[in-house]
Image: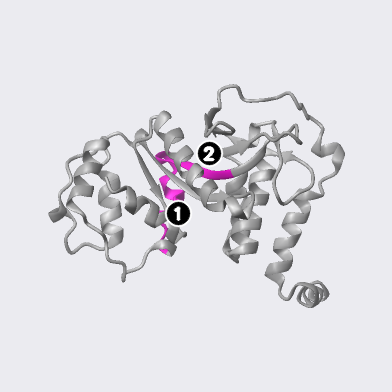
Amino acid sequence: YFHIEQMAIKVFGCLLKCSTEFEMFKLIHKPISVLHRHLDVTKKNSTSAIIDEKYHYELVQDISTDERYFHTEFSEHPLPLSDAIVLINIATFIKEHKWYEMLNHLEISSKGEHFILYQYTDNNIYPTIISSALIQTTSNKHDWLFFDNFFQNIKWKPNLNADGLLSLSHATSMSPLTRSQFVDKSSTEIENDLFYSILDKTKACEAIRLTISGEKSKANYHLYLAQKGLAMALKESGRDIVFTIIEKPAMVLFYQSMNL
């Protein structure tokens, strides 16, 4: 182990970067016999919805059981949906943003309900994933990152807009909300109060790990399509309220500009 660590530091600079590359390597270089054992190039989901003419979006109930293959910008050959999403998460969140904490939680991205946005191109028989996001129901709220202490800060100042609270309670199955309910409360208390105000918990979910792939010149356009597709997919599935963690300032500004 000492020699492995020394070699990792020499080649990659640190052990965490080495582990990241190794996890990507394992996904990309699976034995071809295993990779294409159940390959069916004709397998398509006829229930997917189309956005902007050529982009498809859908909610997959459990990506670990989905047998379709998808292209990503991080591998020369197509991968099973589950592997493709894990690879994209590693390449974007861990390698690009250096969120090495995710190395211990890769299995979260390999199973369960996910939103996917993808497109078919003239040159490939397999679609290319543009965006994905993990969807978690209230039945496993104890696993939600939204309520994890890591994503809390006592210095945060909640934005208690009266019109926003009114709009939220009108648009969802929540008990009436007033600004006075949340005065002098911490962000943690406010978020928990909001959650327990939801009358029908099946109409709520958490959406995290939103990834954007594809051409860099289309990044903002793909981000817009992903948010629009995700919102429509969740609404169509009966979700009225979504808890999420946003890292990109552009996304925060996007939602603020939409106002009510």
Q: Residues within 10 Å of mark 2 (few under 14, many from 20)?
A: many
For discs 2 and 1, the disc positioned in front in the rendered view: 2
Q: How many circles with numbers are drawn on the protein?
A: 2
Q: Which residue is mark 1?
A: 145
Q: Residues within 10 Å of mark 1 (few under 14, many from 20)?
A: some
Q: Secondary structure at mark 1?
A: loop
Mark 1 or mark 2, which is nearer the start of the sequence?
Answer: 2
User: Eyeballing the image, is 182 above or below 198?
Assistant: below
| Residue 147 in view of the camera | no
Indicate which disc residue 42 carries: none
For the point 78% across and 29% down, the residue is 38
Residue 159, horizontal then vertical, whole percent: 25, 59
Magenta segment: does it hold 101? no
Residue 9, horizontal then vertical, whole percent: 76, 76
Residue type for callout 2 = Phe
| Residue 251 in view of the camera | yes
For the point 56% across and 44% down, the residue is 132
Where, quadrant-wise, is the C terminus in this rendering?
top left
Which region shows up in magenta?
A: 131-149
Q: Quadrant of residue 124?
A: top right
User: Eyeballing the image, is 60 above or below 86?
Assistant: above
Residue 176, horizontal then vertical, whole percent: 17, 41
Q: Which residue is mark 2?
A: 115
For the point 74% across and 61% down, the residue is 21
For the point 59% across and 33% down, the residue is 54
Q: Is residue 159 left or right of residue 147?
A: left
Residue type for callout 1 = Leu
Instruction: Give the spatial CA distance, label 2 vs label 1.
Output: 17 Å
Q: Quadrant of residue 137?
A: top left
